[in-house]
Each structure stands twice: as structure tokens, then as C-alpha cells.
Amino acid sequence: MYSTKLFKTIVTSILLIIALVGCSSKENSSDKKESTKEVNVYTARHYESDNEVFKKFSEKTGIKVNVVKGNAEELIERLKREGQSTKADLFITVDGGVLANAKNNEVLQELTSDTINKNVPKNLRDRDNQWVGLATRARVIVYAKDRVKPEQLSTYEDLTSDKWKGKVLVRSSSNLYNQSLLASFIELNGVEEAEKWSAGMVKNFARQPDGNDRDQAKAVVAGTGDVGIMNTYYIGLLANSKVQEEVDVANKIGVFFPNQDTNGAHVNISGIGLTKHSKNKENAIELIEYMTSVEAQEYISKTNFEFPVNPEAKKAELLQSWGDFKMQELNFDTLGEHNAKAIELFNKTGWK
Ligand code: FE
């Protein structure tokens, strides 16, 4: 009797163990299945347009996009620190210099896809295929329409002439957009000319640099100065703002693409790269293919007012209204190469 009871207990225990093992192995296999249907993105672009594009991609493919947002330098450091154990499959950032920085820190890998190569022209991709352009923006001159005629404007260099004394508005030199602008001048015109430009701008400042790009447009309209430097997509964001005062600011400023008879307007790029230790490579490449597709590119242009990298994609109407323009021709890597020198020149010339 005693032994029958023991036998029953043993049988029950064995059955229970089998059931538990069965359950957990089933859970494991469904886990695995799910992990092949996701892609992990580290991004330094914090735009609503990108979130929507990720959502559209998930709806189309069933691949979940997990997003970690952060500052570009911190994300690159994190990728280095995490090494092989990183969850990240993709790295997204603004600025060609930062993309070059990610590449030089060896956190990316070469990626190949005929679709991507078809979507994005060669000059908007890394020469070693370590990153692909997602969108571009120009850094242009804006002016008070009631006080300035576009015929009075010509080049970035002309903003340093006496006629603009006390009338020029631009944000601080700690900002990457300005650092890359000066880096482009170092590349195209040499260190000496770049330094002269920075000194000439400081001499003509309407005030000590204050606020972001949008604040320069607001100060132009308020009469603090007559001309300002800002990125094109902010003009679109102002024009489509929910705040009426911002819409008014957009209506009162003119947009001027400088250096059309010389080196062209300064353009910077946002890009995406496959991380060195990506575990979901196929999904990651599929997401890049989608982000560079006509559909996603038109969506980004329409909502974030950037220029598409895919030449088949239509620009936002506002951008079309500005017409075509000549852009600087330089390798985006050089923006990173000259970054330290640009900061040095800003400091030397007193651009705060
Ligand atoms: Fe920005």
C-alpha cells in the first residue's frame, strides 16, 4: 500500500515535470519566432515623422520597430560599450560628420541592397556603404520681407560686409549645424577664409547668439535684425505650426539660397547605418529599404519639410515653391574631419 502511494507520487511528479518542460520549451520557441520579427533602432532624430514611418513599416511587414532615442554621441558611445551584446540593429542620426564619426568608431558595418542603391543616389550614401542618407536640409539665409529685398543678398560671405552691421542673427556656435556650416567653409575655402567669415559674422551680429533656429526667424520678424541663418525644415515647421504667431513669422520671412554663383548652399544630411553587431540584419535592411522608398520619403518631406534623398519622391509643396538650387559639393565626411577646427575658429573669433 505504502509503495503504491509512493509510485503514484513519483508518476505524478514525472508528469508534472514533463508538462512544465513542454510548456517552457513551447514558450521558448514562440519567443524565438517573435524575435525574428523585430528591429531595434538607436536614433538621434527626434521627429514625429520618423515615428509614423516606423508605424507604417510595422503595419506593412509585421516587423516591430523598437526605438531608443538619445543624443548621437551618447548612442555611439553606448554602441561601443555594448559591443556584441547590443540590441541595436540600426543607428540613425542627423549630420554627415556624426555619421562619419560612427563609421570611424567601428560601430557600423557595410550593407548591400540593390533596392537601397536604386532608392538613394551614390553621393548621398557613404562611399564604403556604411550608411545611407535618409533626408537632407539646407542652411539658408532668411530675411525680413518688409525691410530686405532678395536682390540685396548673395552669399554667406556677403553677410560679413559692412552693409549688414548690427543686422545678422544666428544661433550659438555650440550648435552642430553651425559647426558643420563652418566645417564646410574650411573644406571649400580653406582655414583662413573660414576664420575671416566667422570674425566678420561676429562683427555684424545684431545680438549675442540666443535661442534656436526658429528663434532667429522670430527675431528677424521682431526687428532685432534683418537677416538670419537657419535650416530649411524649420521654415516648414513654422509655416505649419498650430501656433498662429509662428505661422505669421513664416509668412513674414523670405527664404534665400546663398552662393548660387559660387560653391552652392550648405546642405547637411541625416542617415541610417546597420550596426556592426546587428542580430536582425534582414529586418534592418528591409526597414532601410522602406525608409528610402518613395512612399516614406514623400511622407518625411510632407511632414518634416526635409528634402527627399530618393529622386523619384516628390518634395513637400513649400519646398517645391522654392525651386531647385545649387548645393555645396563635398564629401559629408569632411564635416566631421573639420569639426574640431571649426570649434577652435569659433572660439578664436568670439562667436559664443
Ligand atoms: Fe534641428
Image (cartoon, rainbow, N blue to C red):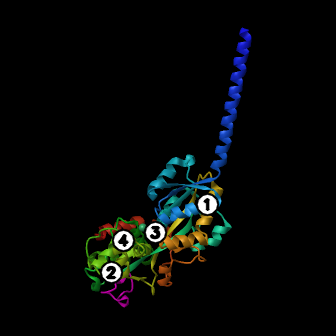
Residue at the front extreme? 1
Q: Which mark is residue 59?
A: 1
User: Going from the N terminus, do you reach mark 3 or mark 1 first?
Assistant: 1
Amino acid under disc 4: Val
Task: Work out whether residue 91 can be spotted.
Answer: yes
Q: Nearer the viewer, residue 116 or 31?
A: 31
Element class at badge 4: loop
Element class at badge 2: strand
Q: Nearer the viewer, residue 79 or 24?
A: 24
Neighbourhood count class around disc 1 (C-alpha, 10 Å): few under 14, some 14–19, many 20 upward: few
Question: Do the CB atoms of the residues marked 4 and 1 lie less than 8 Å apart?
Answer: no
- Marks 4 and 2, how far apart at CA: 23 Å
Closer to the camera: disc 4 or disc 3?
4
- Marks 4 and 3, how far apart at CA: 34 Å
Question: Do the CB atoms of the residues marked 4 and 3 lie less than 8 Å apart?
Answer: no
Q: Which residue carries the number 4 mark?
A: 243
Question: Which residues lie in the magenta part?
Answer: 144-159
Q: Quadrant of the N terminus?
A: top right
